[in-house]
Image: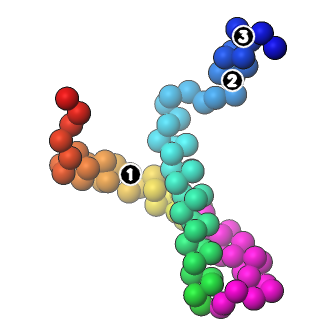
């Protein structure tokens, strides 16, 4: 593959900049929901043979819920950050 074709091929599968808040919310929700499901399931039921199934069962509810919550809370968090952090110079 030539040097010029590489950036073009990479650019084709990327989303536009307008999708940034949604992509951020998706990844943040996915990672945080999985971590929370792992921790809470381990704390409540212990790490047993059915631990992965229990975690995935919890994740089915937690991920879409977390995604919606991140979308709703993001503007409030951005405002709070703007109120508490100096802008870059």
User: Which residue in the protein does label 2 denote?
Assistant: 10
The reply to whether dot 3 and dot 1 touch (C-beta < 8 Å) is no
**Whole-Å distance between the Cαs marked 1 and 2?**
28 Å
In which image quadrant can residue 1 be found? top right
Left or right relative to 86: residue 36 = right
Q: Earlier in the sequence, mark 2 or mark 3?
A: 3
Residue sitting at 72 percent across and 10 percent down? 3
Magenta stretch holds residue 54: yes
Position above or below: 43 against 52: below
**Whole-Å distance between the Cαs marked 3 and 1?**
38 Å
Where disc 1 sits, the SS reads helix
Camera-side mark, 2 or 3: 3
In what quadrant of the picture does the C terminus appear? top left
Q: Earlier in the sequence, mark 1 or mark 2?
A: 2
Disc number for residue 74: 1
Residue sitting at 68 percent across and 68 percent down? 60
User: Which residue in the protein does label 3 denote?
Assistant: 3
Q: Earlier in the sequence, mark 3 or mark 1?
A: 3
Q: Nearer the viewer, residue 27 or 22?
A: 27
Where in the figure is residue 8, as x and y percent of width and height? 69, 15
């Amino acid at each position: 593959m030539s040097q010029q074709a590489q950036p073009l091929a990479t650019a084709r599968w990327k989303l536009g900049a307008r999708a940034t808040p949604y992509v951020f919310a998706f990844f943040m929700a996915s990672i945080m929901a999985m971590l929370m499901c792992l921790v809470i399931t381990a704390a409540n039921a212990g790490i047993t043979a059915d631990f992965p199934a229990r975690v995935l069962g919890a994740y089915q509810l937690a991920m879409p819920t977390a995604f919606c919550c991140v979308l709703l809370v993001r503007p409030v968090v951005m405002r709070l950050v703007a109120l508490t952090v100096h802008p870059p110079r």
